Amino acid sequence: MVRGRAMCGMSILGDAYKIRFGTSGWRDRMDSNFNDRNVLRAASGIGAYLKRHNDGGQVVVGYDTRHNSDHFAQLVCGILNDFGFDSIISDAPAPTPAIVMAVASHKAIAGVQVTASHNPPEYNGIKFLLSSGASPLPDVTAEVERLIPDVAKPKPYSRKTFSPKEDYLLALKKRFRLNAVKGMHVVVDTRHGAGGGYLSAVLSANGAHVWELNREYDPDFCGMSPNPTEVNVQGLKDAVAANKADLGIANDGDADRFAVVDASGRYYTANESGLVLCDYLFNQRHEHGTLAKSVQSTAAFDRLCAHAGVKEVEVPVGFKYIAAELMKGAAFGVEGAALGIAFGNWIPDKDGIAAGAAMCEAVGDQKVTLSQIWQRVSQAYSYGQFVTMEFPRLGKVMETLDFLKSETERDMFGGRKIVGRSYLDGVKLNLSDGAWFLARVSGTEPSVRVYIEAATKKEADELSDAARRMFGF
């Protein structure tokens, strides 16, 4: 029996569930709206879009380790074949970065990955990829959404498979200087997701001593969260300590997210690990290109870029915006609050496996501990103190956000002078001494998210208190 499967074509015409492609595709619960009926509809919207813009061609389809992901991927293939495209499906669960790479390596016109990434096991999702491998910007997903029918029927599909793993690992060896990892001791936690056997294989092949945790595929992630936030990686910290390892690397369910733990057990956020990697790539490897960072990323990147003579581009939250900059030649991309890191001359998407390989290279090549690197980097670029908050999307909160967007007279916030404003994604106030405040509507939750950075914890707490008062909390 296939878990979470619903009958097809059971809706009333005109009353169909609205499928929306958000910051990284469409996701929903399998016990609710992510079912056969709606997967067929979403695939039909994608097929109709591709039909408008292409005269045939191949589409690469992959899937993660969740319940029914393989089944949903086959439904997608059947629909796309019916639209006249040649659909090929991964021969096993595959990490999203490997599917992104396969789109380009197969010269496909598009790709689809069935995954809910870091979300809990009851969720699943569909990520649509352009011929470049990049996620589409809102104008494309809006067109796809308009083409989604109220009802779609399953179509036959004779399974045609490909293997993405070897091509991906070979490319990884070419992109990064992995001879630097020889002799390192690394723990890799793939959290029962699709990245099992990827990073561990390439590190081992280059002489590192590797312990891999939670490698076995499990659709329920053995009761763990697939998201490698600090609260979820105590097992990784314990394994690093027990094995006296140099590093611990964790990925999420589809291995596009990345987190790192140093030898002392310290957990690094995406802002922190991104700063370490950015410093290494621009100041040690002397790579060329811009830095693309999401609007909620640390201002320490600004100071690093100024020091390195590197142009910086700030983009809205959502990795598709960073992907667009990577396509223009950006050398590095980071989404500070989402464990997302990307590289130029690589795939146009975040890649937790590549980020793990790059971090091992950076530590091995500099021949000092990650803790020592962080001490140098954080001091050199004046890394600040962060506070993040979340407020419900209620009347008072939304009224306050609208007021912040519209008013221009205020010159102070939380006792600090406002020296600049940005409305790129919500409202961002740049404050004196490098502090900043950002409030934006979440693209995935019914909430308003607030991000604050200041030089000291005391200053960050003062600004967060000011934000609570402003929003009525």
Image (spheres, rainbow, N blue to C red):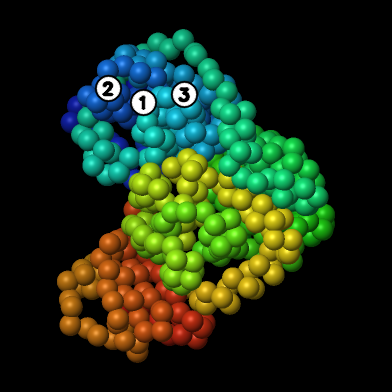
| Chain-order first, disc 2 or disc 3 | 2
- Using the numbered discs, state the Cα–Cα distance from disc 2 to disc 3 in whole angstroms: 16 Å
Nearer-the-camera pick, 469 or 254 = 254
Residue that carries the numbered disc 1 in the rendered image = 109
CB atoms of marks 2 and 1 within 8 Å: yes
Q: CA distance from mark 1 to mark 3?
A: 9 Å
- Residue 444 seen: no
Answer with the quarter of the image where residue 17 lies.
top left
For residue 54, the mark is 2
| Location of residue 68 in the rendering, given as x and y in whole percent from the top left corner | 51, 28
Q: Inspect the image, locate mark 3, and give the three-letter code of the amino acid beneath it.
A: His
User: Is disc 2 surrounded by few (<14), some (14 to 19) or many (20+) residues within 10 Å?
Assistant: few
Q: What is the crowding at mark 3: few (fewer than 14 residues within 10 Å), some, or many (at least 20)?
A: some
State the residue position of label 3. Answer: 106
- Decide if residue 405 is on the left or right side of residue 33: left
Task: From the top left corner, tell me how far across and down residue 243 is, in percent.
Answer: 82, 54
Amino acid at circle 2 = Asn
Q: In which quadrant of the rendered image does the C terminus lie? A: bottom left
Considering only vertical position in the picture, is 21 above or below 366? above
Q: Which residue is painted at 78% across and 56% down in the image? A: 245
> Count of labels shown?
3
